[in-house]
Amino acid sequence: MLSGEETVEGRVESHLSVISARKNLNAFLSVFNDEALMSARDVDRKIKNGSAGPLAGMVIAVKDVLCMTGKITTCGSKMLQNFESIYDATVIRKLKEADAVFIGKTNMDEFAMGSSGENSAYGATKHPIDETRVPGGSSSGSCVAVAAGMSTASLGTDTGGSIRQPAGLCGIVGLKPTYGRVSRYGLVAFASSFDQIGPFTNSVRDAAAILQVIAGKDENDSTSADIPVPDYASKMNRSVNGLKIGLPKEYFSDALNPEIRSVLQAKIDALKKAGAKIVEVSLPNSEYTVSTYYILATAEASSNLARYDGARYGYRSPHSTDLQSMYVRSRSEGFGDEVKRRIMLGTYVLSSGYYDAYYRKAQQVRRLIQNDFVNAFKEVDCLLTPISPTSAFKLGEKMDDPLQMYLNDIYTVSANLAGIPGISIPAGTDKNGLPVGVQLLGKQFDEATILKVGDFLETVN
Ligand code: GLN
């Protein structure tokens, strides 16, 4: 992981200098300067005496939605501006035990709601290649940290694409594990039946190394799965010979941007040449994914975010005069526009009279979408798809049109509805030099196959 004479301390120093040189990208909400250097020196000592853990040398940035003892966790919201976590998320504990070093906490769309990084109460994150553009979201800062060299890797969360989409737009690797593969203990909830934690890295091998450490059953999260975690590295042999890879025809319709299509075609050709079998498959309910996701995710969000009432923790309005006005004013002043929009949508679809028409119906459609994947995986080992309809768009371009912003998630939300793993791999660039990624989707708990295919794809240009 470290090259030649490199030390962890030296690596932290160089990341810290990029963080300060590129402050205008607005990727970090807090930086752990001295603490990171101190832990780096600790790990350097362990490396010398041969007792270092598997992630020694990995300098990690953390999306500000994950709890770390004694650190502020804002979730990109004014609501939690001064909220100090009192415990470590399970992923943080595991990474620490593996000797990773934490460098800071990153900017994000408020409560992970967004696809551009513009919904943060602390200002938009900017794309490292073109600062007039968005880096994608909601894990905007974690993605930019890795893409710009501010950290070796980072943690993001993916409820509807928030790891894979920014990774695609910034040209790095982003992995969303199977729902239940990684404990959500210590992750501030957005939509609990969708949320998963995963890594951003510069290589598939680094992503596998991190997943290896953070995966597994956790007594503190009853939705974490008690399913053995394979040794991912040993399965990556750069051979795809004989593998069956499906192209969902609904994702390759005439509506697909031709530049993205041609970047993906080059990867598909390379897979064919290496002996993979490319098969067309169908996911017939694809047209319903965005609407189903935005009904169910907003419903869950409206329930999860009810806890921010100004009474227990988080922002309390100084203008309140009685209990009712404390609730109303704290929530009105503490939440931003997109979060309020989601709470209203979610409350509406759950309200009596509309529950059957929207929430229950969406649950039923979710099952149909899950079945589409089960059927497709009877024929193929994994799927290959686009990640987003366009490369990085301009800051402000979609801010006045929430529906356009939601439609950006068309290729990513299906994996969260079905609970399956997905990974973004850099695939090329468009005519403006902006990155285009390719998405691989796997069977539930079969991260190994998409890591293996992704690792192969990294070797073909
Ligand atoms: N863009 C999607 C949304 O706004 C996904 C967000 C996420 O994955 N956290 O809900």
Image (tube, grey):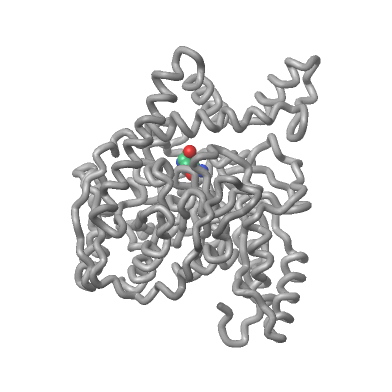
Where's residue 132, x and y in %? 47, 49
Quarter containing the C terminus: bottom left
Residue appearing at x 29%, y 59% in the figure: 381
From the viewer's side, name the closer residue of 153 and 107: 153
Residue 299 can be seen in this image: yes
- Give the residue displayed 63% in from the left and 39% down from the top: 121
Picture coordinates of residue 18, whole percent (x, y): 61, 66
Q: Is residue 385 left or right of residue 279?
A: right
In the rendered image, which quarter is residue 275 located in?
Answer: bottom left
Q: Residue furthest top?
A: 353
Look at 19% across and 53% down and name the residue there: 280
The correct choice, above or below, for 29 with respect to 95 in the image is above
Q: Using residue 445 as the reference point, say whether residue 48 is left or right of it.
A: right
User: In this rendering, is residue 311 above or below 193?
Assistant: above
Q: Residue at x 37, y 64 (%)?
A: 449
* Coordinates of residue 264 in the picture (x, y in percent): 27, 58
Total number of numbered labels? 0
- Above or below, 182 against 308 in this view is below
One can see residue 132 in this view: no
Q: Quadrant of the N terminus?
A: bottom right
Q: Between residues 403 and 158, which one lies in front from this camera angle? A: 158
